[in-house]
Structure formats: structure tokens, C-alpha cells
Amino acid sequence: MKQELFENHFRPIWQAFETTLDELEQFKQLRKKANVTGFADQYRQVCHHLALAQERQYSPYLIDRLNQLALRGHQQLYQSHNNILYNIVHFILVGFPATVRREFTFIWASSLLFFGSLLIMAALTYYDPSLIYSVYPEGAVRDFTEMYDPANKAFMQEQRSAADDFSMFGFYIKNNIGIGFQTFASGFVLGIGALFNLLYNGIVLGAVMGYLTDMGFTDTFFPFVIGHGAFELTGIAIAGAAGLKLGYGLLCPGRLTRKQSLIKAAREAMSLVYGVFFLLLIAAFVEAFWSSSSYLSNSAKYIAGGSFWLLVLSYLSLGYTGLNRGAHRGSE
């Protein structure tokens, strides 16, 4: 069908759909009174017409017009609650876990690199503690050894006040988000930067774990890290997955140009990055006010830490599916 016939035949549908969109967008306070009968069917028709126009390579003007109508319709259908709080809650409950599940290939690759290097380095350093000096200078090793030495625990807890907790909360936010963003952004270098950051962070954390375990400081180290580790370590792994996706977009553009492929990958990866910031923010809060608390027993920290890990893994792997099933049941 020629473009002119196509436009003449379907123009009334597009105009009716545009009129409904104008009413919904300009008179929000009257939205309940607006006639939206058949809106979903009109939206599907416009999307179908857009696909036909693109397939038949009609003029960019027509494709752009249909694309704008489809975008506006999508916003009214799926983002009818245009307030920031709703969008944040919806993203946390639905959008982020759904994105993690959709990008599971990059998530698995990133997790394998990060947690694999961490566990291997922890085992190597446990059996050969001198390896810690291949990762950290002597002064840094002395500092964290004193920090986790059980003999200094009581003295350090007496020195720490509530103001220190808030101060460290700010420090942890800056530090955690800095690591997460660096891991993601370095993916622009063909993914090599993300690969390096995942391995580097896994190796340095594993070296500390193995060294302190060999020193016998398990009662001070593991109760401290198990709680916020569920959010922080998971966040770093997901940030790495977002970085790897950027690199893959550059290396394997498919039918797109490399620029188009990179933009597409970056747009899709941003949902992961927003979720990483959410996880790292929680990690900073837990680390400042829970992990460092001197009023909680190690048993309480182990139980809570294990629960945090179970919660995070369940949220990311099952959260979206559970909500979908609930929605389907509700519609039946």
C-alpha cells in the first residue's frame, strides 16, 4: 500500500487517539471523566501502524508522528501515576528485579568473575598470608589488622559515637556509589574496564578475608561484613554486569552502528545502575548503623546477615514473577 493511501485510510484513528491523549494530558483533574473507552485498542492499532510504517519504510515524518503517539499512549497506559514516589516504588518492586532477570546472562558472567575471584583469592591468602602484601602495602595491612583485632574491639567501640555513625554513613555512601559507578562506567572501554574492576575488587576483598581468617579474627570480621555485604557485594556484581553490557554493545553491534548499539545498551543498562544505587544506599545504612553496632551480639548479626542475603536473592530472582502471578490472579 502506498503511503498516501495508508495515511488517508487510518488518519481518523490517529486523530481520535490524539484527541484522547490531549484530554488525558491537559486535564488531569478531569481524567476520571474523560472518555477512555477503547483506548487500549486504539493504542494497539497505532503500534501496529507504526510497525507497518517502519517495515514499509514510509517517510520519517510519518514514522516519527506514529512513534510519538505510541510513546504518549504507552505513558498513559503504564505510567498513569505520574508522581515520583509511585515511579520509585514501582521501579524498586517491579522494574529493577525484572531488569536483573532479563539481563541474567551478564549478571551471571559478572557474578562469576567477582565472587569467583573473591573466593579463590581468599583461599590462596588463607594458605599463604604473605599474598596480602601483593595486594596491599604494609601500612594498610597494619591498619585493618588493628581495626579487626579482637584485643582492640572494646577500645574502638568506646571511641565511636552516634555522630561518628552518621559521618561514616556519608562516607560509605560516597565510597560504595563511587565503586559501583566506576565499575559500570569503565565498561565503555570495550568492557575491559568493567572486567578489570570486577576482578580487582574481588581480589582485594578476598585477600582481606583470607588474611584475617588466617589471623583468627573471624569473630570481628565476619559479623561486621555479613549484613551489608548482601547489598554491597550484590550491587558491585550488578554494576559490573551493566558495564559488561556496555562493552558487549560496542563489540557486537549486530545490524546497528556501534554508536546506535552503545546508546541502546546504555539506555537498557541504566535500569541496572539505578538499582545498584538503591542497593548501595541500603548497604551504607546497614554498615554505618548495624554492622558497626557494639550493642548487638554476633549471633544476631549472623542471623540478620543470612536473612539479608536470602531477602536480596529472593527479591532479585522471584520478586517480579511473584507480583506478576499476583496480578494475574487478581484479574481472573
Image (cartoon, helix red, strand yellow):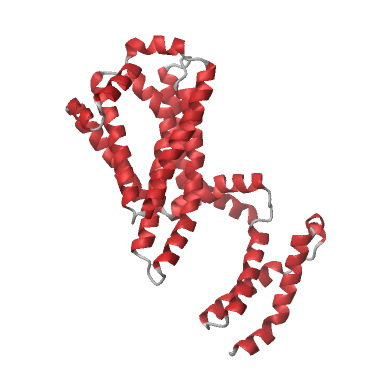
- Residue at 75 percent of width and 62 percent of height: 24
- Residue at 46 percent of width and 41 percent of height: 314
Above or below, 325 against 236 in this view is below
- Residue at 63 percent of width and 58 percent of height: 78
Where's the N terminus, which quadrant? bottom right
Residue 90 visible to the viewer: yes
The quadrant in which residue 216 appears is: top left
Above or below, 7 against 288 in this view is below
Q: Where residue 144 appears, x then y in whole percent?
A: 32, 22
Q: Where residue 175 appears, x then y in whole percent?
A: 44, 34
Above or below, 8 against 309 in this view is below
Q: Where residue 166 appears, x then y in whole percent?
A: 53, 24
Q: In this rendering, would 77 be left or right of 129?
A: right
Q: In this rendering, would 196 be left or right of 155?
A: left
- Residue at 68 percent of width and 82 percent of height: 10
Q: Nearer the viewer, residue 134 or 104?
A: 134
The quadrant in which residue 15 appears is: bottom right
Q: In this rendering, would 191 be left or right of 121?
A: right
Q: Nearer the viewer, residue 174 or 42?
A: 174
Above or below, 63 against 91 in this view is below
